[in-house]
Image: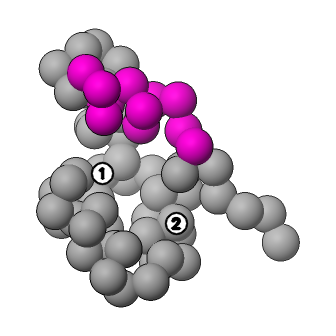
């Protein structure tokens, strides 16, 4: 089974450090429809998922 690289994503790290940068905004836009991000969210425990929703917004799933 292939594991998700979303936790170590370079663009996600860019968003975390500089959310208003071009790459940070691109990543935020990208997670709205990314099937990899959606499957990553489904694979993490509920408490971690809630933390991710707080940080990145509910539209991600």
- In the image, 7 versus 32, the foreground residue is 7
**Is 17 situated above or below 42?**
above
Between the residue at mark 1 and the residue at mark 2, the CA separation in whole angstroms equals 13 Å
Nearer-the-camera pick, 36 or 57: 57
Q: Which residue is mark 2?
A: 40
> 37 or 55, which lies in front?
55
Q: Which residue is mark 1?
A: 32
Q: Taking 14 as reference, is 17 left or right? A: left
Residue 59 seen in the figure:
no
Q: Is residue 13 left or right of residue 25?
A: right
Write the start and end of the magenta stretch as one range. Answer: 8-18
Q: Is residue 30 visible?
A: yes
Q: Position of residue 46 (x, y in %)?
A: 36, 85
Left or right of 52, for residue 10: right
| Circle on res. 21 | none
Q: Is residue 54 above or below residue 24?
A: below
Which is in the foreground here, disc 1 or disc 2? 2
Tell me which secondary structure the magenta stretch mostly adopts.
helix
Task: State which quadrant residue 60 falls in.
Answer: bottom left
């Amino acid at each position: 089974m292939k594991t998700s690289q979303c936790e170590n994503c370079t663009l996600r790290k860019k968003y975390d450090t500089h959310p208003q940068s071009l790459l940070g905004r691109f990543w935020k836009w990208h997670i709205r429809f990314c099937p990899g991000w959606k499957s990553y969210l489904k694979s993490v425990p509920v408490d971690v998922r809630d933390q991710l929703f707080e940080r990145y917004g509910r539209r991600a799933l």
